Image (tube, rainbow, N blue to C red):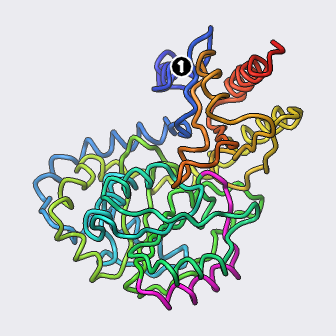
């Protein structure tokens, strides 16, 4: 690749502008790792060569046999969930998968139980479907299973949405004992359980053994897994999937929105080729993110006005602010060219004002700029700068 092009496509010059250089804005509302350029360009070249033949062979329908179906099925099976193409429905990203599930299963005032905090995109989609959101607060160390059981027993939700693997935004990882306990409790209630596994591959632990899947049986008709290549490979691929019982897959595939929420034919070709390079990309990405995480943690550890856990996975720590609310701090940071997501965006009921997400998906130099601007904003808030 020409050096000029590589420089333009580097993490410093992505779709987030010049990433803080020379006073340029920094947008940390999106936690996107950098694109794996060499593998991506090679996959695009290979996909371009095979596109004409693929378009001629392409037929409509969710159960079409494709290299991408096979690759994702093999990935799920290797991670402990026996899967074939009948268990899979492809989507143009995880949000598209959640939108399809919402459209197929939720009606106005349908009750949905979810963690607090949780992924803002899911909140928006469920609210858009007219659902009644019921929050189940997380503890600093994880999930309160007795409290969740009480909520399920009282609310009897139509859908329960959980992020058990490197939870967004807290990075919490559900342990095997809790997964087993959750599985026992979920089977007692007639609720569709959606496990969002978007962050599953961003495992930054030294022993990166894939998390167990003890919360559900592989053949359970009430359990749906949502996956995506956005964090493990590249968000712009817009490729995700729903892994569920074949009957559930058929129901979703028959919904009028299913066809419009599929990935493009070219996107499927590129993604199938990127899957073959997934392990190399994942290993390099984990090393890069671990370095950036540790750099951010070192910078934040000396700030007396916030506290956090060093993330064991995912793209960002979940900061607790000790002397102000995140809405005010984010407003002052925005005035200094740093866009952040305050905690209330992650709350089903608009709470969590004392929390802030701060991604470490940019290089250390950009992280330094972000922390400097955040520190300046806090000083201005306290009248000391």
Label tally: 1
Residue 181 vs 317, above or below: the answer is below
Does 183 lie within the magenta span? Answer: yes
Residue 293 coordinates in the image, percent (x, y): 73, 41
Q: Quadrant of the C terminus?
A: top right
Residue occupying image coordinates x 35% and y 40%: 44
* 371 with respect to 23 (left or right): right
Residue 202 coordinates in the image, percent (x, y): 61, 54
In the foreground, 164 or 158: 158
* 219 with respect to 247 (left or right): right
In the foreground, 362 or 74: 362
* 108 with respect to 93 (left or right): left
Segment colored magenta = 169-190
Residue occupying image coordinates x 61% and y 33%: 327
Quadrant of the rendered image containing residue 125:
bottom left
Disc 1 element? helix
In the foreground, 39 or 282: 282
Q: Residue extending furthest top?
A: 22
Q: Residues within 10 Å of mark 1 (few under 14, many from 20)?
A: few
Name the residue beneath numbered marker 1.
7
């Amino acid at each position: 690749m020409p050096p000029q092009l590589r420089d333009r496509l580097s993490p410093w010059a992505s779709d987030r502008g010049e990433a803080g250089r020379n006073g340029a804005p920094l947008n940390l509302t999106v936690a996107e790792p950098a694109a794996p350029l060499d593998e991506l360009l090679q996959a695009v070249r290979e996909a371009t060569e095979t596109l004409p033949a693929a378009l001629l062979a392409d037929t409509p329908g969710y159960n079409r046999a494709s290299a991408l179906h096979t690759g994702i099925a093999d990935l799920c099976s290797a991670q402990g969930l026996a899967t074939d193409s009948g268990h899979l429905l492809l989507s143009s990203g995880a949000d598209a998968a959640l939108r399809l599930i919402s459209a197929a299963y939720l009606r106005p005032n349908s009750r949905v139980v979810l963690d607090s905090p949780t992924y803002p995109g899911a909140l928006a989609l469920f609210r858009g479907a007219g659902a009644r959101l019921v929050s189940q607060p997380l503890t600093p160390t994880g999930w309160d299973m007795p409290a969740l059981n009480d909520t399920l027993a009282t609310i009897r939700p139509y859908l329960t949405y959980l992020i058990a693997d490197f939870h967004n935004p807290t990075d919490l990882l559900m342990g095997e004992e809790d997964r087993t306990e959750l599985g026992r409790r979920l089977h007692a209630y007639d609720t569709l359980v959606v496990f969002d596994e978007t962050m599953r591959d961003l495992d930054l632990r030294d022993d990166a053994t894939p998390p167990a899947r003890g919360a559900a049986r592989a053949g359970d008709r009430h359990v749906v897994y949502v996956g995506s290549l956005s964090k493990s490979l590249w968000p712009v691929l817009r490729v995700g999937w729903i892994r569920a019982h074949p009957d559930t897959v058929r129901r979703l595939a028959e919904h009028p929105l299913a066809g419009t929420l599929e990935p493009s034919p070219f996107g499927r070709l590129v993604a199938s080729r990127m899957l073959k390079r997934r392990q190399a990309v994942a290993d390099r990405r984990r090393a890069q993110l671990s370095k950036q995480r540790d750099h951010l943690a070192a910078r934040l550890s000396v700030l007396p006005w916030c506290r956090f856990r060093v993330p064991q996975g995912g793209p960002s720590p979940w900061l607790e602010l000790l002397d102000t609310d995140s809405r005010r701090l984010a407003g002052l940071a925005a005035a200094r060219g740093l866009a952040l997501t305050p905690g209330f965006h992650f709350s089903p009921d608009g709470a969590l004002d004392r929390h802030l997400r701060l991604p470490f998906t940019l290089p250390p130099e950009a992280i330094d700029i972000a922390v400097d601007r955040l520190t300046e904003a806090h000083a201005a808030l306290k009248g000391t700068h």
